[in-house]
Image: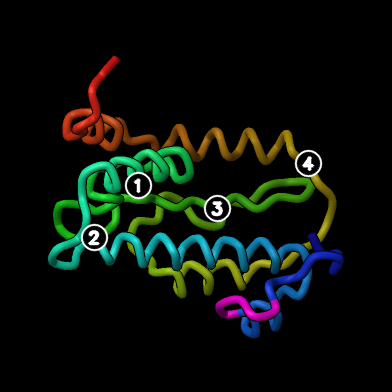
Amino acid sequence: MCRNDRQPLTNGPEAARIRLHADNRLGAVFSALYSFWTARHAAVASRQQPGARGGFDVVYSALYSFLNTGAVDTTAGQRPGGGRRDAYSVVLFNESSKVVLTNDLAKNPDELLDTLLLEEAYGGTNFGVALRTSQSVMLQNWSTERLVSCIRNSSLPFF
C-alpha cells in the first residue's frame, strides 16, 4: 500500500489533507472511504428533513446499507434517537492485521478520517490474516436487531 502508483483523488474531498499523510495506495483507499462516508452521512441527514422521500427509496437504501456496512434499517441507517445505525469497522493489514475502528456508531466522516490518517502503509500483504481478523470483528459486533428491524418494518412482500 505504500507504492504511489495509485493516489488519493486529486480534486476529491479532503484530498490535500489525505495527500499530506498518505500520498500512495493507502491514501487512495482513505479517499474512497471518505467519499463513501460523506455520501452516506448526507443520505442519512437528508432522511431527517421534513418531506424526505420514503417507500422503496428507504428500502433500497436499507438493503444497500446491509450489503455494504452490515447495518440495516428502513429509516436509512438511523437510530430511533437520531444517530446512525451504521457501524463502521476498519481493519488494516500487511503481514499482520490491525483493527483501527470497531463498531463505530458515533464519529462523523471527518473524525473517521482523522483516525485513519494516523496509520501508515508498510510491509507485505497477508489476505488470510486480514480475512480472519475481519471475520472476528464481524462476529464480535454482529447485531441481529438490525436485520430483524428491517424485516419487521419492511414494506416489501416476502416470497
- Give, as a three-letter code, the residue at label 3: Val
Q: Quadrant of the N terminus?
A: bottom right
Residue placed under numbered mark 4 in the picture: 126
Whether the magenta-drawn stretch holds residue 12 is answered as yes
Q: Amino acid at mark 4?
A: Asn
Q: Which residue is mark 3?
A: 90
Q: Nearer the viewer, residue 116 or 37?
A: 37
Picture residue at 33% right of the left edge, 62% below the top: 106
Quote the CA–CA distance across marks 2 and 1: 11 Å
Residue 28's image quarter?
A: bottom right
Eyeballing the image, is 11 above or below 65?
below
Front residue of 119 and 68: 68
Who comes first in sequence, dot 1 or dot 3? 1
- Residue denoted by label 1: 61
- The foreground one among 39 and 127 is 39
Image quarter where the C terminus lies is: top left
CB within 8 Å, label 2 to label 1 = yes
Q: What's the magenta bit mostly, secondary-structure-wise? A: loop
* Residue at left offset 41%, top offset 50%: 103
Q: Residue at x 32, y 35 (%)?
A: 143
Left or right relative to 39: residue 95:
right
* Mark 1 residue element: helix
Q: Is residue 122 left or right of residue 45?
A: right
Q: Disc 2 marks which residue?
A: 47
